[in-house]
Amino acid sequence: MAQKDWRVARYAIGGIFGFVVLSELLTYATLVVLADRPYVAAIVATALVSLLLGIPLIVIAAAQFRRADRLRSQLNHMVVHDSTTGCVTGRGLVHHANGLERRRQRSGDKLQGALIHVRINNLDDIGGSFGPQWNDELLQFVASTISTSVRRDDVVARTGPASFDVLLTGASETDADQVCARLTKALASSHFAADGKAVDLTLSLGGVLFNGSIDLERLHRAAASKTVEVTGTPATTIEFARLPSA
């Protein structure tokens, strides 16, 4: 660490010394060229020295600002996205819902939509039988199945070790039924293999409709309390709970 600090100090001292020498040379040159006009020479020398100092500092500051902005964007992405599945995290879902709620309060309009809760009931059993690495494989598999079954603007979030919430903003009851039926069919007909062996998945789905404001905690509890196990046939139907208007 001390060696690195000394290297930085050496470069800094060398840069300062070089800048001083170059500034003196520029000042001397302008005085020689404009010997009969010393005031003009002083102004020109000051301008040249300012440009010599200012341009590199502005370029460096702009580059550092851009780098910091890029790092901040990467950090924000890591905070609100689950590293295993690529889905939004529970915190990211809260930020999204808060943004929708602020827009609702400014516009005065009511929000409607639905929240679908998906839970993998035998995630720990699969990890115990085939190894913990297959937990991540299964989570990725289920997350991919969910993401390809819902609408483009629906937000898929991993909200627990073995659970996902799907927020369908603006969805009518018919829209929610269609999405849920498509998702249920996709999950019921999905086939997962761990270490080359077919695994029977045990999944549960539940849903809740809302009209008014978004209270994620209430929506999550209501949807989780209405979960129904998805069987091996696509005939499983999910009945949505309904929160009172707010």
Image (cartoon, grey):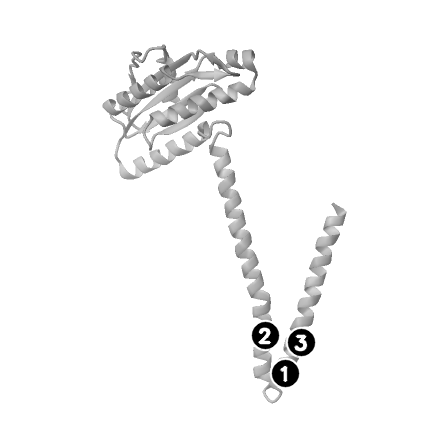
Q: Earlier in the sequence, mark 2 or mark 1?
A: 1
The foreground one among 196 and 8 is 196
Q: Quadrant of the N terminus?
A: top right
Q: Which residue is drawn at 66% across and 67% down?
A: 19
Q: Which amino acid does label 2 sit on?
A: Thr
- The residue at 68%/69% (across/down) is 20
Q: Left or right: where does residue 245 sit relative to residue 11?
A: left
- Which residue reaches farthest front? 196
Vertically, is 58 above or below 160?
A: below
Amino acid under label 1? Leu
Q: How crowded is mark 2: few (under 14 residues within 10 Å), some or many (20 or more)?
A: some
Counting residues from the N terminus, which is met first, the one under dot 3 or under dot 1? 3
At mark 2, the secondary structure is helix
Whether residue 215 is visible here, answered yes or no, is: no
Q: In which quarter of the image is residue 174?
A: top left
Q: Quadrant of residue 103?
A: top left
Residue at label 1?
Answer: 31
Image position of 2 with respect to 138: above or below: below
* Mark 3 to mark 1 CA distance (whole Å): 10 Å
Q: Disc 3 designates what residue?
A: 25
Establish if 155 lies above or below 57. Answer: above
Tell me the quarter of the image containing the C terminus: top left
- Residue in the picture at 30% in, 21% down: 182
Going by the numbered disc 3, the residue's amino acid type is Leu
Q: Do the residues labelled 2 and 1 touch (CB within 8 Å)?
A: no
* Residue beneath disc 2: 46
Does dot 3 land on a helix, a strand or a loop?
A: helix
Q: Where is residue 221 in the image (x, y as percent from the top left)?
A: 39, 18
Nearest to the eye among marks 3 and 1: give it: 3
Q: Using the image as rendered, state which of residue 44 and residue 151 is in the foreground.
A: 151
Separation (CA) of disc 2 from disc 1: 12 Å
Q: Left or right of 192: which side holds 100?
A: left
